[in-house]
């Protein structure tokens, strides 16, 4: 029915932060409130078609982190998610 909705809804948050100049973005590490917001963005990944890393990358860029720092933080957030997935 609405197969394209999750990927299309994820494309906009990923496209918007690309217009922010790199030098205008904040430095590492993120504040606690920004880190929590980026972490909660992982909840979007329970929607079929939405990737966990894509949602955290988009949230980090929207929060104003540099692309490199956003990728690093997204990787660090994967560790507890992957560890929890291995527990059954």
Image: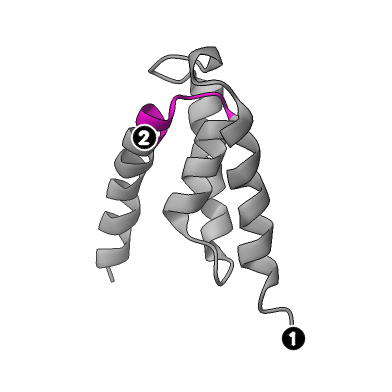
Judging by the rendered image, the residue that carries numbered circle 2 is 73
Q: Where is residue 58 in the image (x, y as percent from the top left)?
A: 54, 42
Report the residue at 57% width, 35% height from top.
Answer: 18
Residue 22 higher or lower than 3, as above or below: above
Quarter of the picture containing the N terminus is: bottom right
- Range drawn in magenta: 63-70
- Picture disc at residue 1: 1
Residue at position x 45%, y 55% from top? 52
Q: Earlier in the sequence, mark 2 or mark 1?
A: 1
Tell me which residue sits at (62%, 31%) in the image: 19
Q: Is mark 2 on a helix, strand or loop?
A: helix
Closest to the observer, 14 or 85: 14
Residue, far bottom = 1
Between 84 and 50, the one nearer to me in the picture: 50
> Is 3 covered by the magenta stretch?
no
- Near-viewer residue (87 or 77): 77
Where is residue 50 drawn, in percent x and y?
Answer: 54, 63
**Local crowd at mark 1 within 10 Å, few (<14), some, or many (≥20)?**
few
**In the image, residue 33 above or below residue 84:** above
Residue 17 percent location from the top left of the image: 60, 34
**In this view, 13 is above or below 65:** below
Find numbered disc 1 in the image and state the secondary structure of the residue it sits on.
Answer: loop
């Amino acid at each position: 029915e609405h197969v394209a909705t999750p990927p299309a809804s994820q494309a906009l948050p990923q496209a918007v932060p690309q217009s922010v100049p790199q030098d205008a973005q904040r430095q590492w590490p993120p504040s606690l409130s920004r880190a929590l917001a980026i972490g909660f963005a992982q909840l979007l990944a329970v929607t079929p078609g939405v990737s966990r890393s894509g949602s955290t990358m988009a949230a980090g860029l929207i929060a104003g982190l540099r692309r490199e720092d956003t990728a690093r933080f997204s990787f660090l957030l994967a560790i507890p998610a992957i560890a929890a997935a291995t527990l059954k």
